[in-house]
Amino acid sequence: MQINQNYLNLKDSYLFTNIENRVKNFQQKHPNVKLIRMGIGDVTLPLADAVVHAMRKAVDEMGGASTFHGYSSERGYEFLRDSIKKYYLAKGVHLNLSEIFVSDGAKSDIGNVLDIFGRENTALIPDPVYPVYVDTNIMHGRRIEFLAGNEENEFLPLPDASMPADIIYLCSPNNPTGSVYNKEKLQVWVDYANKNDAIILFDAAYEIFVSDDNLPSSIFQIPGAENCAIEFGSFSKTAGFTGVRCGYTIVPENLKRKINGEFISLNKLWLRRQTTKFNGVSYITQRGADAALSEKGLAQIRENIGYYRQNAKIIADTLSELKIWFTGGRHSPYIWLRTNGMSSWEFFDFLLEKARLIGTPGAGFGECGEGFLRLSAFGDRENVRRGMRQFKEIINTL
Amino acid sequence: MQINQNYLNLKDSYLFTNIENRVKNFQQKHPNVKLIRMGIGDVTLPLADAVVHAMRKAVDEMGGASTFHGYSSERGYEFLRDSIKKYYLAKGVHLNLSEIFVSDGAKSDIGNVLDIFGRENTALIPDPVYPVYVDTNIMHGRRIEFLAGNEENEFLPLPDASMPADIIYLCSPNNPTGSVYNKEKLQVWVDYANKNDAIILFDAAYEIFVSDDNLPSSIFQIPGAENCAIEFGSFSKTAGFTGVRCGYTIVPENLKRKINGEFISLNKLWLRRQTTKFNGVSYITQRGADAALSEKGLAQIRENIGYYRQNAKIIADTLSELKIWFTGGRHSPYIWLRTNGMSSWEFFDFLLEKARLIGTPGAGFGECGEGFLRLSAFGDRENVRRGMRQFKEIINTL
């Protein structure tokens, strides 16, 4: 028996373990200090009433002989796919129900989608980046090219003709930098992909934070994307579903590639993958997700997003006042700031010890993240205020 | 961009589509005939009260600021893994919490586990079989050997030294045949795997139907299995969770393989796979699964299993009375019967047209399934009674 030896090429991601260890050491030395956690990307507000109400009803249905639901379609219930279709229609994007695949979360789909691609493809991954893009390709033994994000391109790299790629990862609004591609820049990527027979895997997990209608919140708002892109959506940040688990993947019917003279539909390949290795999402979860997209639900979840966005503004305003370079915060829950000459980890320790504030060192997201730090706005308002007061004080001591 | 061309080698599984088409045609001709569905393997009884109660409470917690849960561990909450540990302890199997991985269902894990194995392995798959074992290996381009199940071996094939294998699939109680390996036969498999450095993927989805303590309901009841086996468990049949989605995979800490001189832990490989391509199961679902394993929950789900088992007995008794050869029914919700000289599909049509009864043609589960048919006991008592009365009548006309 042989294991998949590509796994031996994975670096253990020590990022969050490393953070936790440093925090533990600090707290042992200072047991009475209250730390402010602005590192994690997990939501903190409870589920919206509309969602709770719908899931409570669904639980009761599952307990009744005449209302019980067994296996659902691996694609997801039509009622939910129909709501997702309407959600996209409001963005000016027309989808067929057959192009929408409901899942237990974008992270699963982003990893699993690589099943339908050949190993000989080259993956093009921006740096800094969500580590899952890198690790899932290493597991397949795929060649990876990194595209540098930096201050010059505001962490929004554009195609580089010297870097031919088959699978291109784009995340906008970006994790970890919070930067957002505008339509012109995203059009450049779509045109590049179509010209080079590449596929764009577009991670739209943070799309609801886009507050400017001139900025794209779906790649399918860009002409030509239906011929080259797969989009991953999530209820995790949109509706606070990190602990409920629901996402969706959009694979256009037009997304085809010619193999041995015949056109193969990637939609059909993904359907085959999901019907073979997946068995659908809980009826209760799907009812909750559907309620989140109802008129009432959308109003409630947008109120929560507004709360996080206001937190982000408090962080951003502090940084502007301190003249610290940063991206994000406006159309994203993340703020990506320069660590003023210190290394990511030096600045992390500095914040921890002097400001009692926990961030995420940018170096944990890739080489190009060195010299930066990520702050998350998914927290309690009072903590964010206190955190930024303490941040300001220590920066002024420098 | 290249697709995974192994997908082009998949045969479309027309089985259930084919069944639905024939049923549709029949109903168009006979709109007033009430058909009895004994084909599908989906549960019909509602969730147990203990489960409904726990999930209702969990939904309310998710709606409260102080009781909300965000991301859970990809391994699953400790409260649920601890209940699974106790469930196995009652079978005489000692597990560490680190050996238990909670997931959204056994089907996902059975497909995804192949990620950690090399492509050069040969998979040994009994025939007839759950089609997912075959398709997931075709997707990886792995060599597959089939092991024939038949009347002589009561559809419980044993190792064949002329068929070297690296990955061995065993499903007991079996889907579709309902046959169960005894301890002696399972020991032969475990010894064979240990001798040949093979891994057994043991599908225990139907373990709760085992009503004889002398029969194994977990492969880890067999000495040596902790060095060669991974077990897949499911709440789908156990607790009626087909529409709720929860399962678990047991990967022993002792399961290691020597690669380039060093021992690699398959438990660590699976943990890495899950932390990279999976994000845990809904808190609400995990609370429901945990309640199913509580004292009250177990009593309630065993009552449901007893109901299905009684259905199975009604089917089995009818077949015995008619002197039709069959397996299963005693420790399984499935009965696998000989189609008396007709082909699987001829017998399917015969049952449909004459007895108004829908079964599943054995040929749909592999070449060795030809000449057999599967009946499912997951139905309503009155329908099963009526179905078997009608079955008896038409058999007597032969």
Image: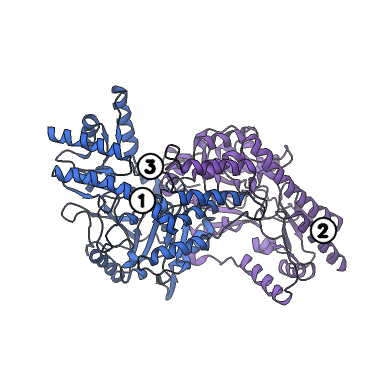
Chain colours: A purple, B blue
- Residues at discs 3 and 1 in contact (Cβ within 8 Å): no
- Residues at discs 3 and 2 in contact (Cβ within 8 Å): no
Which residue appears at 29% of the width and 37% of the height? B382
Nearest the camera: B181 or B43?
B43
Percent x, y of residue A203: 60, 47
Return the mark for residue B53.
Answer: none
Whether discs 3 and 1 lie on one chain: the answer is yes
Instruction: Look at discs 2 and 1 and give the one toward the viewer.
Output: 1
Nearest the camera: B46 or A278?
B46
- Position of residue B140 relative to residue B398, above or below, is below
Q: Which residue is mark 3?
A: B44
Rounded to the nearest angstrom, the CA distance separating label 2 from label 1 is: 65 Å
- Position of residue B38 relative to residue B103, above or below, is above
Rounded to the nearest angstrom, the CA distance separating label 3 from label 2 is: 61 Å
Instruction: Look at discs 3 and 2 and give the one toward the viewer.
Output: 3
Q: Secondary structure at mark 1?
A: helix
Q: Is residue B49 visible?
A: yes
Q: Chain of mark 2?
A: A
Please name the amino acid that badge 2 sits on.
Answer: Ile
Please name the amino acid that badge 1 sits on.
Answer: Glu
Q: Which residue is mark 2?
A: A324
Q: Secondary structure at mark 2?
A: loop
Please name the amino acid that badge 3 sits on.
Answer: Thr
Percent x, y of residue B394: 17, 33
Q: Chain of mark 3?
A: B
Q: Which residue is mark 1?
A: B303
- In terms of image quadrants, where is residue A227? top right
- Residues at discs 2 and 1 in contact (Cβ within 8 Å): no
